[in-house]
Image: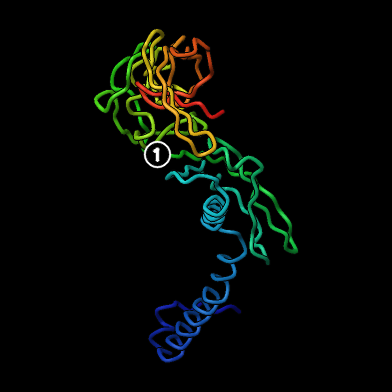
Amino acid sequence: MCFITKQSDYINDYPDAFNFMIKLMLMFVSAFVTTNAPHAESQWQTHESIYETVKSYVAQNINTTAEYEINMVSLADRLNLPLCTQPIQAFAPNLSKGGRMSINVRCGGAKKWSIFVSTTITPFDNVVILTQPLQHGEILTEKHLNLVRQDVSMLHGNYLTQSESILNKQVARNLSAGTAVTQKDFVEPKIIKRGDHVLITSDKLGIAIKMTGVAQSDGRRGQVIRVKNQNSERVINATVIDSEQVSVSQ
């Protein structure tokens, strides 16, 4: 014989017993969630920890004094890597060059793994650029230049951040507007022209000697040119000091 009792009848007949069962079930569910939730969260290496490892590695190893930005391609959401029992490490063979690269992040713990994070490092710096085109032989002045903050990853270090060293120098080749200039784009201007009369000086054995001469070629400051001594008619080598003077060391 079978007896079927409605739940409502049971609750009405045994209210204390029913409440006890409800409390017991709630305690069991709470204990299960508390026990298993941290375990579920901690069994995988977080993607954020991988990104932080990459950023830390770049900061410690990049060879640049310029500011830079790091952009990483996000890892797939479904990618689950075992939580490493040791600090994870990063490595990249060509980090100093910047640009686009794959940085290897790896775990050397009990459950070893390795992954490549696609990363782009973009260095920025204040760059001296031309505001207008210049022709070979023109003299550079402050009005030709501007300082612009820009991506320098493609310049490979061939740029200037200050203009003092090139001001009032002569352009060595034709340059277009917007060019990031370098030291090699300019030379000292010719301050002596062929046929100019110059003062030849010499300090041989502590005795200062001065004589007049005629330049046999154009010359820049510090350049050695041929000069004819007007007294002896001899042609000698002399170093250009300024627009009116050359010096003989021997």
- Please say if 50 is above or below 15: above
- Residue 242: x, y in percent? 37, 25
- Residue 48: x, y in percent? 51, 56
- Please say if 32 is above or below 215: below
Quadrant including the N terminus: bottom right
Q: Which residue is mark 1?
A: 125
Quadrant including the C terminus: top right
Q: Nearer the viewer, residue 127 or 13?
A: 127
Q: Which amino acid does the dot numbered 1 rest on?
A: Asp
Q: Nearer the viewer, residue 2 or 57?
A: 57
Residue 167 occupies quadrant: top left
Using the rendered image of the protein, determine whether residue 69 is visible from the camera's viewpoint.
Answer: yes
Disc 1 secondary structure class: strand
- Please say if 234 is above or below 19: above
* CA neighbours of label 1 inside 10 A, class few (<14), some (14 to 19), many (20+): many
| Residue drawn at x 50%, y 17% as measured from the top left | 225
Residue 175 occupies quadrant: top left
Q: Nearer the viewer, residue 51 or 235?
A: 235
Left-right relation of 172 to 51? left
Residue 218 occupies quadrant: top left
- Identity of the residue furthest to the bottom in this view: 16
- Residue 181: x, y in percent? 41, 26
| Residue drawn at x 32%, y 19% as measured from the top left | 139
Numbered circles on residues, count? 1
Using the rendered image of the protein, determine whether residue 186 is visible from the camera's viewpoint.
Answer: no
